[in-house]
């Protein structure tokens, strides 16, 4: 979610290479929390266990039974990932105010989804839909469109999982593990962490991250509150000085390019990028399968609405985390002192400011913060594969038990795929693909969100619009070069026929919509068959009969 | 526009728009107006506790948005209860089942 970071992290020589010794206390605290969380993950299989636990909605949606508290922690733990904690402050650290778009983004996402997510919850509960692509198939009667949505979801999620590893790596580097020694030695801790994660996700399904999210969010809140109160006391002059130091550092021209890195206010020409990044990211967030899974797992429509109101609390935390980037500048960290890796700004700041034992707690917060979303993302991607590729195209008659097994195996494949992705390619590639993922996932917005309200748009027009948005977005993202990268150098690009820059995902969505409207007009004119709608108008207002009952309807239909 | 996208016909003469729904809509739209009107907050002064206006104003809107969403949530719930009441009194069958989570 940060285009600025991609400019600075190219040279990734870990701090440890500078000869820093392993910090035993930090490592000890981190390992303690990791072991505790792993035990919790395996225990989760017995938590709220249902009679039909071999069913996909048990493994893949936690039995659709989560109430207010669990959902709040699960969604918060799921959406605010370790990569967010590392990358948002890194963007502010490297580029200033533009990186702060994360705050309006996470403000706007909640009122936006408050409008349409309850409808998605209702229709999914009524018809037993496990994935949004299930809904698209039912509503638009098009396996091709459903496959397009599913594949987009999987492709956008894979590099996102990979980036969770980058979050853990940044902490391990600062503690002093990794960097020196052979590749095998360096990557061994990551391997162990992911193997344990894969094992408890396999056995416990969505219940594992739901339970671990409690620990993760508690640690994160603790870390953030301590950081925002304690770190400014370590910097003479407090907050005033932090902003002043950031301003003078960011506006100093870079000797290489002769241009300043940024400013603590938005420079001329960055207003539209700021606005489009905020709105585009907000629209894209709940198109990600891992975000939707948290919604579909809740037990009532009211829980969804109430939670969306309460989730705003996380945005305040994110705003504070973002400002850690300026604290790192005020603490005299520079791109050069971090060996060119802005991703190290927050871990290095914690390492510098906190006593070792609390730095260990903070690193545990980030590392566990990586495990929760990685588990949920792999489950979400696995559900998409099972329901919309395997069942639709390979084994139409697969029993619910078989679907669960396929999903379990797919979640393993997805996770190890992500691991290999990060270890074999460089981190830059993972980040590039994640940025591209945001552009791609937004192109499923019309099929899903418009579909929740209307069948006015023809299924083939939706598919053509999707394809146009994907092609445009991918090409434009590919063409962006930066001082350190030939391709995927920026999330913003010039809007065609103008000199104004905007978030590529939003421009691609406009292309998508233009094609959608034109194709819709033509297809309606030639009376192309529109298919049958499996849903009825009242399904979108559907509610469970009473809170706390098991979803009879869902199990009957699935 | 096809007819299937419309909510079930409102019983008891209630239209799709009600004062409570309008209130909820205003609460949900306000954050967009505030956050996208960037020139209104892209400045340093007035500062608060050392924070430039750009930063504390947007963080303040996190809290304002939270409050607005609670108002929208309560308004939507009351609206639904009123609609239920209107449906029951006019003798229509309630297709949604009893209210959850009140």
Image (cartoon, coloured by chain):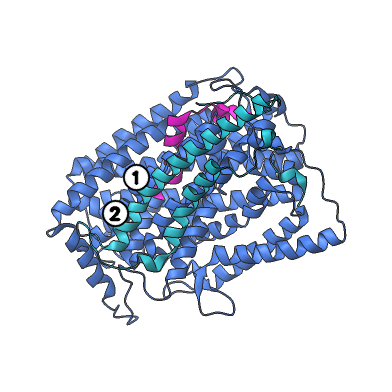
Chain colours: A blue, B cyan
Chain to which mark 1 belongs = A
Residue appearing at x 37%, y 40% in the figure: A368
- Residue pushed farthest bottom? A258
| Residue A279 or residue A53, whichever sits in front | A279
Q: Is residue A517 left or right of residue A358?
A: right
Is residue A462 shown above or below B4? below
User: Residue B93: which quarter of the image?
Assistant: top right
Residue A205 picture location, percent across and down: 53, 31
- Residue pushed farthest top? A51
Position of the N terminus of chain A by quadrant: bottom left
Q: Is residue A67 magenta?
A: yes
Question: Which residue does the numbered mark 2 point to in the structure image?
Answer: A346
Question: Which residue does the numbered mark 1 point to in the structure image?
Answer: A366
Residue A93 picture location, percent across and down: 31, 63
Residue A16 picture location, percent across and down: 27, 55
Position of the C terminus of chain A by quadrant: top right
Q: Which residues are magenta?
A: A56-83
Q: Are marks 1 and 2 in contact (CB under 8 Å)?
A: yes
Label 1 secondary element: helix
Residue A172 picture location, percent across and down: 32, 48
């Amino acid at each position: 979610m940060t285009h600025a970071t991609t400019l600075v992290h190219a040279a990734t020589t870990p701090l440890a290479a500078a000869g820093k010794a392993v910090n035993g206390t930090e490592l000890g605290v981190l390992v303690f929390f990791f072991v505790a969380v792993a035990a919790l993950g395996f225990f989760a299989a017995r938590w709220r266990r249902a009679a039909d636990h071999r069913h996909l909605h048990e493994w893949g949606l936690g039995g659709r039974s989560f109430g207010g508290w669990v959902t709040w922690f699960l969604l918060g733990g799921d959406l605010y990932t370790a990569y967010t904690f590392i990358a948002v402050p890194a963007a502010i650290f490297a580029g200033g105010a533009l990186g702060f778009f994360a705050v309006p983004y996470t403000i706007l996402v909640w009122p936006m989804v408050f409008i349409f997510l309850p409808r998605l919850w209702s229709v999914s509960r009524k018809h037993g839909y496990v994935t949004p692509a299930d809904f698209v198939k039912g509503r638009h009667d098009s396996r091709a469109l459903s496959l397009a949505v599913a594949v987009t979801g999987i492709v956008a999620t894979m590099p996102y999982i990979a980036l969770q590893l980058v979050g853990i790596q940044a902490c391990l580097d600062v503690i002093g593990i990794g960097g020196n020694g052979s590749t095998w030695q360096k990557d061994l801790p990551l391997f162990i962490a992911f193997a344990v994660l894969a094992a408890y996700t396999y056995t416990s399904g969505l219940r594992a991250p739901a339970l671990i999210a409690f620990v993760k969010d508690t640690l994160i809140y603790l870390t953030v509150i301590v950081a925002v109160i304690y770190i400014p006391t370590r910097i003479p002059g407090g907050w005033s000085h932090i902003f002043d130091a950031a301003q003078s550092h960011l506006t100093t021209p870079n000797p290489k390019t002769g241009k300043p890195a940024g400013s603590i206010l938005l420079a001329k020409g960055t207003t539209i990028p700021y606005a489009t990044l905020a709105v585009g990211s907000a629209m894209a967030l709940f198109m990600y399968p891992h975000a939707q899974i948290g919604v579909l797992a809740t037990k009532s429509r009211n829980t969804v609405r109430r939670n969306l109101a309460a989730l705003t609390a996380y945005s305040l935390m994110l705003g504070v985390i973002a400002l850690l980037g300026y604290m790192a500048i005020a603490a005299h960290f520079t791109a050069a002192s971090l060996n060119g890796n802005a991703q190290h700004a927050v871990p290095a700041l914690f390492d510098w400011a906190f006593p070792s034992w609390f730095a260990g707690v903070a690193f545990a917060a980030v590392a566990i913060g990586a495990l929760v979303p990685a588990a949920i993302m792999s489950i979400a991607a696995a559900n998409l594969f099972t329901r919309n590729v395997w069942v639709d195209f390979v084994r139409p008659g697969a029993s619910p038990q078989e679907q669960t097994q396929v999903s379990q195996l797919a979640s393993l494949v997805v996770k190890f795929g992500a691991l290999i992705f990060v270890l074999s390619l460089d981190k830059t590639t993972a980040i590039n693909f994640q940025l591209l993922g945001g552009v791609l996932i937004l192109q499923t917005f019309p099929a899903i969100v418009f579909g929740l309200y209307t069948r006015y748009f023809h299924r083939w027009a939706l598919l053509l619009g999707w394809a146009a948005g994907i092609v445009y977005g991918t090409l434009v993202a590919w063409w962006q070069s930066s001082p350190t990268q030939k391709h995927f150098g920026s999330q913003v690009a010039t809007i065609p026929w103008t000199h104004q820059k905007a978030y590529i995902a939003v421009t691609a969505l406009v292309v998508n919509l233009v094609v959608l409207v034109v194709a819709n007009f033509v297809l309606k004119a030639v009376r192309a068959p529109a298919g049958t709608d499996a849903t009825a108008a009242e399904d979108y207002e559907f509610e469970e009969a009473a809170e706390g009952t098991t979803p009879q309807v869902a199990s009957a239909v699935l | 526009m096809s007819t299937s996208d419309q909510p079930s016909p409102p019983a008891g003469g209630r239209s799709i728009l009600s004062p409570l729904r309008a209130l909820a809509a205003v609460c949900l739209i306000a954050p967009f107006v505030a956050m996208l009107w960037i020139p209104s907050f892209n400045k340093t002064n007035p500062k608060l506790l050392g924070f430039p206006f750009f930063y504390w104003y947007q963080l303040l809107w996190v809290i304002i948005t939270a409050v607005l969403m609670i108002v929208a949530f309560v308004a939507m719930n009351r609206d639904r209860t009123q609609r239920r009441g209107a449906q029951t009194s006019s003798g229509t069958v309630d297709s949604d089942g009893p209210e959850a989570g009140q």
